[in-house]
Image: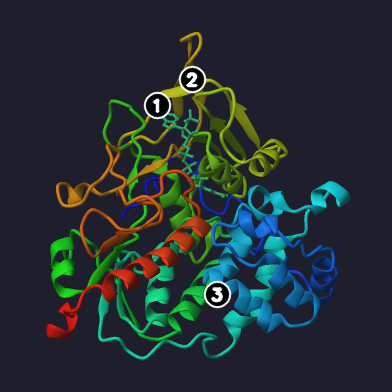
């Protein structure tokens, strides 16, 4: 795909605005892992609460006091197993989970010590070593003869695939992209979750055996839902959100304007991150976590980043907002919407945005060389129209408290089904639940479809 920012004749849009080594250092990891000694000290801050509010706050129900006791007593392997038993994406979730609003928010040490136990960092510490080790900690049950198709190799799809493989079912995972991992591979800021770690975790998950990964195979392009339903005993849909919310400008696709997730994906996949041409002054449109993360991300490349938000407060998490407001390269324009991109369209480059104040209606211009849109994503489920029950926005509907869709034998979870939380940890948890739901359903089906083929 042509790089929309790679347009000649604008001296303000250029690669190597900062040195390659500087940018590489930025991406080396925001949170250094705990040393064994620091992990022991932190683990011993845990009060091992009987009612474990941290466990209740974890979407995957990890036995937090249990695994922390493992670290405190030197049983790292036991700690890792306790985590992975509940969440096979325990390593990445230790780094990317919004722990401050989940387990760590519930930690009772807030009250007596003013600071929670660093549960996310301890979780990562416990699991990280296991990813590097040869072999897989869980064994698969004897082959059941059943075969399940999993569509999407993100946290929901691979958690489901792993759960099914543990129960002895054969799994084919279809992934539209060339690299598995979903948003862990493409969408999370690289300093939070380096690409090599995302890949190592996928390799570890597949290490259970019985899972065949088929990349570059897209539902609706290479096969249909009806075909999968015919060829497999059950189908799981964990396809995430493929659509981009429209900005509402009159023009069609605009040169110089890029969606946040596609920019982050491009940056993550780039061998030399400093080589991407970026404007000197750029704007990010939106007020959610993605917009704030992208604005922070862009400060590694651009000189000035302006966040443009249509309201007077952000919806992003507090911790991200604190980092945003502490960054001198970022300013925020409140109550403004972009009504035009100035200078876009070949052969010109972006030279600014036209803004309208949402309260006064006043128009103003802002000179910039790059525009990044982070106003949210939508399900790309039009291809199931009439085949599966969906809501008016295209999210797949499932039975209450279950991942069963309106089609028998078809299950769905993750972002395409969960329009509220949309986090890696909730996707992993619901993928795990889908494996259980599929298992129960398979038990009621005497005929094995896949073995007949
Ligand atoms: P989002 O939460 O839906 O936020 C979209 C933002 O764009 C909102 O601020 C919204 O404004 C604004 N917006 C929507 N339509 C607009 C329009 N036409 N013009 C201008 N602004 C518009 O989407 P997101 O930020 O991509 O996040 C998606 C999910 O991923 C969330 O669940 C989020 O928590 C998760 N996520 C988490 C992390 C993290 O944990 N670090 C990082 C990235 C994403 P209003 O506020 O007015 O609605």
Q: Look at discs 3 and 2 and give the one toward the viewer.
A: 3
| Residue 342 disc label | 1
Q: Earlier in the sequence, mark 3 or mark 1?
A: 3
Taking the spot 49% from the left edge, 56% from the top edge, the residue there is 426
Taking the spot 23% from the left edge, 47% from the top edge, the residue there is 389
Q: Look at discs 3 and 1 and give the one toward the viewer.
A: 3
Percent x, y of residue 196: 54, 72
- Check if mark 3's residue and mark 2's residue have beta carbons within 8 Å: no
Of the 4 image quadrants, the one containing the N terminus is bottom left
State the residue in front, 78 or 2.
Answer: 78
Q: Earlier in the sequence, mark 3 or mark 2?
A: 3
State the residue in front, 144 or 41.
Answer: 144
Q: How many marks?
A: 3
**15 over 157 or under it: above or below:** above
State the residue in front, 40 or 191.
Answer: 40
| Residue 365 disc label | 2
**26 over 449 or under it: above or below:** above
């Amino acid at each position: 795909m042509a790089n929309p920012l790679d347009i000649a004749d604008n001296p303000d849009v250029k690669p190597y605005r900062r040195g390659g080594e500087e940018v590489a250092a930025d991406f080396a990891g925001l949170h250094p892992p705990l040393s064994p000694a620091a992990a022991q000290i932190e683990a011993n801050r845990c009060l091992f609460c009987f009612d474990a509010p941290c466990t209740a706050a974890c979407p995957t129900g990890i036995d937090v006091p249990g695994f922390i006791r493992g670290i405190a007593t030197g049983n790292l392997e036991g700690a890792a197993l306790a985590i992975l038993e509940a969440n096979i994406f325990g390593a990445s979730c230790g780094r990317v989970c919004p722990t401050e609003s989940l387990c760590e928010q519930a930690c009772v040490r807030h009250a007596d010590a003013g600071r929670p136990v660093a549960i996310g960092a301890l979780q990562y510490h416990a699991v990280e070593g296991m990813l590097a080790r040869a072999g897989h900690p869980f064994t698969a049950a004897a082959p059941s003869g059943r075969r399940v198709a999993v569509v999407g190799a993100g946290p929901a799809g691979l958690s489901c695939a792993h759960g099914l493989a543990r129960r002895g079912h054969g799994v084919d995972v279809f992934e539209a992209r060339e690299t598995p991992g979903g948003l862990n591979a493409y969408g999370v800021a690289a300093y939070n979750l380096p690409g090599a770690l995302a890949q190592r975790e996928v390799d570890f998950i597949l290490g259970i055996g019985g899972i065949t990964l088929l990349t570059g195979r897209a539902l609706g392009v290479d096969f249909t839902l009806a075909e999968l339903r015919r060829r497999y005993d059950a189908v799981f849909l964990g396809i995430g959100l493929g659509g981009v919310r429209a900005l509402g400008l009159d023009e069609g696709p605009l040169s110089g304007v890029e969606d946040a997730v596609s920019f982050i994906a491009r940056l993550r996949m780039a061998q030399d991150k400093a080589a991407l041409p970026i404007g000197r002054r750029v704007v990010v449109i939106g007020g959610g976590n993605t917009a704030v993360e992208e604005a922070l991300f862009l400060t590694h490349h651009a000189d000035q980043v302006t966040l443009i938000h249509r309201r007077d407060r952000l919806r992003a998490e507090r911790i991200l907002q604190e980092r945003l407001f502490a960054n001198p390269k970022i300013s925020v324009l409140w109550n403004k919407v972009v009504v035009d991109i100035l200078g876009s369209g070949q052969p010109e480059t972006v030279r600014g945005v036209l803004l309208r104040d949402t309260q006064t209606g006043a128009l103003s211009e802002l000179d910039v060389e790059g525009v990044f849109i982070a106003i949210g994503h939508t399900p790309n489920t039009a291809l199931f129209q009439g085949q599966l029950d969906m809501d008016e926005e295209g999210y797949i509907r499932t039975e209450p408290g279950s991942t069963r869709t309106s089609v028998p034998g078809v299950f769905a979870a993750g972002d395409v089904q969960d329009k509220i939380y949309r986090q890696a940890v909730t996707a992993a948890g619901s993928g795990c639940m889908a494996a259980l739901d599929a298992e129960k359903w398979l038990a009621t089906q005497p005929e094995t479809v896949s073995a007949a083929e």
